[in-house]
Image (cartoon, helix red, strand yellow):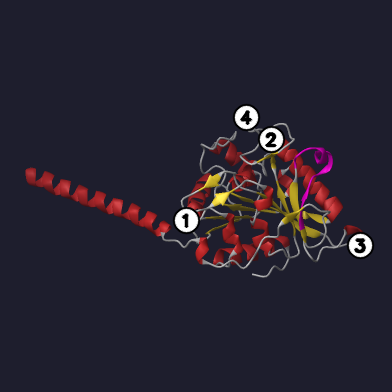
Amino acid sequence: MFELFLMFSMASRLFFGFFVALVMMSGHAEAQLPDISSVPIDLVVPDVVDAIPSAGKRVRYSTGSWKTTQVHHTIWLPTEWTPPQQTQTRMPIIVEWGGNGGFRNDFGDTCTGLVDDCKLGWGMTGGQRVIWICLPYLDETGSNNQVHWWGNSPDFDPNPTLEYARATIDDTCLRFGGDPARVVLAGFSRGALACNRLGLADDTISPLWRGFVCYSHYDGVVESWPYSSADRVHAHARLEKLAGRPQFICGEGNDADRTRDYLAHTGIRGDFTITGTGFRNHSDAWILRPSPARSLLRQWLSKVLSLEIDP
């Protein structure tokens, strides 16, 4: 009997040791992914200037009645842009929401939460042939840009943010010749969560998007985020509003794998392209460097927008 117990005990210890080794190997493999600093950048995001929007400039701009407040977004009009009064051609739009401000990790990754510091849209196109606007999140008064979440704690009211987003997209189409049928929503971290939580919040904003790019985090995977309706029941209801529209989902480390597993359990069949960035960093600066993930994203975007973008 003692010999049987000893054999079982040894087998248990061996199994446990093997399990721990697997976990450690998995974490070790993730830690061994390259840092973005190991790959030279081939893109530099233009500085934001205070000027009238024009071709080849990235400027701060406020929409309509918000001009009397501190609320503003940034807009890039590519060098190929022509005022809508002079052409019948409309340009597609990338709308971007950024990450939370105040972020810093052990790899030296940081995020300010400012619209000026967004990078995804630039890396997705290299500034070619697409209007790029970086939208703010608004505080509960609708008078200031919010660098951390949206609205104010504890309610995190999204409505001022949504109101500004809808008005700004309408204004971009009317004033700058954006194509309302070819608008892609992109976001990093807080912005990736916002793609579904805000972009699919209701039937007034959900129809605006032709596709979505969610980089690092995904609405519904984690239910403990502080914003309202972060639970999977509400996230599932938002997913149903996708109605087959494509999403490109990526993340550092194994973040994309967690999203893939979550989506597989939702029972929702969608047009999902899911991949890792190939880097360890929680930073949208990965997009400023050549990588297989960036090439795949540009191929996806070319297809979604019916527009040729250099890989």
Give amino acid for label 2.
Answer: Asp
Ranked by sequence position, the earlier of labels 2 and 4 is: 2
Badge 2 is on which residue? Answer: 139
Q: Is residue 107 left or right of residue 135?
A: left
Inter-mark Cα distance, 3 to 1: 47 Å
Check whether the beta carbons of the residues at disc 2 and disc 4 lie within 8 A of each other. Answer: no
22 w.r.t. 67: above or below: below
**Region of the chain picked out in magenta, as a range:** 58-71
Q: Which residue in the structure is indicated by mark 4?
A: 155
**Residue beneath the point at 57% across and 60% down:** 286
Name the residue: 73% across, 64% down: 306
Front in this rendered view, residue 262 or 256: 256
Which element type, helix, strand or loop, lies under badge 4?
loop
For residue 298, what is the image quadrant? bottom right
Q: Do the residues bearing badges 3 and 1 touch, measured as CB atoms within 8 Å?
A: no
Residue 221 vs 18, above or below: the answer is above
The residue wearing badge 1 is: 253
Location of mark 3 (residue): 86
